[in-house]
Image: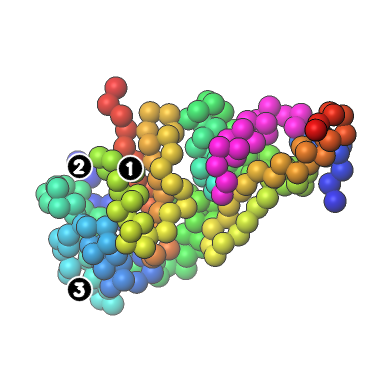
């Protein structure tokens, strides 16, 4: 179970926040699509290995979910940890 | 020097020929028996004298792990130009083609990625005129 500290650590990095921005656009993205979006839309030319490591951190914090389907691997945003943060400090009706 | 052929590594030449012609719409150009396999190429019906695509057997032991690693990361090793990515997406989906990336704007290009059923991901791309 990821703690709130993991969530904040994961969100502390601007590249990881941008990855979440792009995953908020559509679920089920391959590593290739995420890298392409970062490069063409944000001029973030991190290596594929670096992006893969960022995804590992996001997955450990449960901010993304990784789904394997056959030979493919898809990534989607998981907003639940963010909901917990909002519930903790924001009064929401 | 000029580029006259490029290749995709396929797991089965007969299956590949069916997919690349019947499903994608390319036409067979060369089919020359060569040992256990054939020198099997297709071309675009819009450019029959253009660059040929060689459907090359992936029998080398390094080929299959290479292909599997690319597919796992969603990487298309081969890319085809189309006039309208969204129209191709709809046309191919209607024929049962599996896409790992629906049409998406990537800077000046619009791209989509599909599975060729022979172990490869293929990108279709349209780049807007400047």
Query: Dots 3 and 1: beta carbons under 8 Å?
Result: no
Please identify the residue farthest to the left as the structure is shown. Answer: B49
Question: Which residue matches tag 2?
Answer: B2
The percent coordinates of residue B46 (x first, y second) are: 14, 48
- Protein chain holding label 1: B
* Quarter where residue B108 is shown: top left
- Please provide the residue range marked out in magenta: A11-28
Graded by Cα atoms within 10 Å as few (under 14), some (14 to 19) or many (20 or more), the crowding at tag 1 reads: many
Left or right side of B14 for B32 = left
Picture quarter with the C terminus of chain A: top right
The percent coordinates of residue B23 (x first, y second) are: 27, 62
Query: Dots 3 and 2: beta carbons under 8 Å?
Result: no
Q: Earlier in the sequence, mark 3 or mark 2?
A: 2
Residue A17 included in the magenta stretch of the image: yes
- Protein chain holding label 2: B
Whether residue A19 is visible, yes or no, is no
The percent coordinates of residue A52 (x first, y second) are: 64, 44
| Dominant secondary structure (helix, strand or loop) of the stretch shown in magenta | helix
Q: Earlier in the sequence, mark 3 or mark 1?
A: 3
- Protein chain holding label 3: B
Q: Nearer the viewer, residue B128 or A26?
A: A26
Question: Which residue matches tag 1?
Answer: B85
Q: What count of labels does the image hold?
A: 3
């Amino acid at each position: 179970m990821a703690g709130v500290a993991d969530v904040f650590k994961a969100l502390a990095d601007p590249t990881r926040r941008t990855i979440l921005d792009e995953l908020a656009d559509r679920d089920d993205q391959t590593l290739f699509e995420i890298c392409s979006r970062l490069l063409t839309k944000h001029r973030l030319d991190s290596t594929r290995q670096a992006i893969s490591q960022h995804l590992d951190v996001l997955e450990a914090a449960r901010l993304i979910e990784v789904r394997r389907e056959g030979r493919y691997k898809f990534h989607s945003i998981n907003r639940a940890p963010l909901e917990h943060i909002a519930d903790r400090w924001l009064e929401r009706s | 020097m000029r580029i006259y052929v490029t290749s995709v590594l396929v797991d089965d030449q007969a299956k590949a020929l069916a997919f690349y012609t019947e499903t994608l719409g390319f036409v067979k150009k060369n089919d020359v028996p060569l040992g256990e396999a054939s020198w099997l190429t297709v071309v675009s019906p819009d450019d029959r004298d253009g660059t040929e695509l060689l459907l090359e057997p992936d029998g080398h032991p390094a080929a299959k792990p290479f292909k599997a690693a690319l597919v796992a990361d969603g990487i298309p090793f081969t890319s085809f130009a189309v006039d309208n990515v969204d129209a191709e997406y709809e046309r191919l989906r209607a024929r049962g083609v599996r896409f790992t990336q629906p049409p998406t704007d990537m800077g000046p290009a619009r791209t989509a990625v599909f599975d060729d059923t022979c172990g490869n991901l293929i990108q279709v791309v349209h780049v807007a005129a400047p």
